[in-house]
Every structure is written in C-alpha cells, then in structure tokens.
Amino acid sequence: MKRSTLMILIGLVLLGLALAVAASVLHDGLSAKATPTRLEAFVARNARHLAIPGKARAAQNPVLDSAEGQRDARLHFADHCAICHGDDGSGDTPIGNGLYPKPPDLRRSATQDLSDGELFWIIENGVRFTGMPAFSSEADHMAGGNHSNGQDSWKLVHFIRHLPHLTAAERLEMERYNPKGPEDRAEEQGENEFLNEATPRAKPESQTHRRK
C-alpha cells in the first residue's frame, strides 16, 4: 500500500474519531473539570504523534547526561514546569488539575516510552489546544534571553527520564526553587525577620571614661 493511500486512510479514521468527539462535546458541553474520554485521548495522542516530524522523532540527545546537567534541569523544572507538572512530575497540582486536558504523569509509560526527540520537540514547540506552551530556545533568544541551542531542553529530557527515580532530597531542593506567591513570600520574610531578631547581637565595646 502506498504511503499516500495509507495517510489518507489514517486521516479518514482520525476525522471520524474527531466527529465522534465533537458529537460528545455537543451532548455533554465543555468543561475543564471533565476527564477526557478514552476516544478523545486516543485522538489527541495520534494527532500529537502525526504533528511531530519523523526527523524530529528520530533525533538523538546530543547532551551527555551528568550530575551537573541533572541539577540544572531539576532546578529549571522546579522554577518553570512544576507549577503545572509538580516537582515529582505527577501533574497533581492546583493549576494542573484545572487544565484540560490535565498534565500527564510524566513518570508513566505514556511519556517515558516517547523518544528523546519527541520529548525535545514537545518541550520546544508545546502542544496545541492544551496548557503546554512552547519553551523554544529560539524564541527565548529573540526575547533577549540566553540562546542555548536547545541544550536546556535536552537537559530536561534527561531529567524527565530520571523522574521515576527522583529522591526525597532532590524534591526538597526543588521546593526551594518553586515560584512563590505573595503569601509565601510574606511568610518567608516574617520567618527571616524573626530569626534575625532572635540572633544575639554583638555587644558594643565598653568605653572607659577617664576623670579629668
């Protein structure tokens, strides 16, 4: 069977599934609180797969995995990604639970079975019609950031592979780099002020007054 014919058949199948999803939406309405049906999830996974070019899927990670690279990616993830994905990659966060579809559990096979190239593509380009934005290194460069040629994203790929084995010490370190809201910052400031007041201050040197 020619590739063009196969692609047409796949397109027709996906179109039929999309129409079925649309009918379900019209019947049940739209709500970000709902859980996607199996059919909808199936369509989304296949649409994402087709959206990633074959060359990108086959790309190999050019960045060597290292303790330093893991830490860079871990702290980057804590600062930029954990608000939706959670430090542990579970996606069980207040914001993540309010998204539709909800962020996937990055520790499970649905993510871990993706190739390095697929993970890199998703990080760099995002996923349409979801809460996953594009963290493109090129876009970051155009915005005045540090152009890393995608190295930060490749490091994140290594970190995602490590998520199923994340240690308690690593999670504790990540918590210090999570974005803080006004209440958290005020509480932290209060604690620091309390500790500073509780720290004994050095007594000033006594001065000897001589009588004239």
Image (cartoon, rainbow, N blue to C red):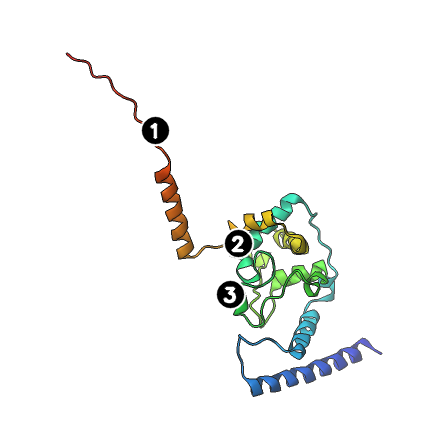
Q: Residue at horizontal 68%, vertical 72%?
A: 45
Q: Nearer the viewer, residue 121 or 109?
A: 109
The tag on residue 202 is 1
Q: Earlier in the sequence, mark 1 or mark 3?
A: 3
Residue 151 image position (x, y, % from top left):
63, 51
Query: Image point 70% across, 70% down: which residue?
Result: 49
* The N terminus - image quarter: bottom right
Spatial CA span between label 2 and label 1: 38 Å
Name the N-terminal-most of marks 2 and 3: 2
Relative height, residue 94 to residue 196 (above, below) = below
Residue 95: assigned label: 3
- Say whether residue 199 is left or right of residue 90: left
Question: Nearer the viewer's eye, disc 2 or disc 3?
Answer: 3
Q: What amino acid is found at the position of numbered circle 1 in the picture?
A: Ala
Mark 3 nearby-residue class (10 Å; few <14, some 14–19, many ≥20): some
Residue 124, position as x, y percentages in the image: 61, 60
Quadrant assignment for the C terminus: top left
Whole-percent x and y of residue 191? 39, 46
Q: Secondary structure at mark 3?
A: helix
Look at discs 2 and 1 and give the one toward the viewer: 1
For the question of whether residue 69 can be seen, the reply is yes
**Within-10-Å neighbours for mark 2: few <14, some 14–19, many 20+:** some
- At horizontal 68% and vertical 75% (from top left) the residue drawn is 42
Q: Amino acid at mark 3?
A: Ile
- How much space separates mark 2 and mark 3, taking CA atoms? 14 Å
Residue that carries the numbered disc 2 in the rendered image: 79
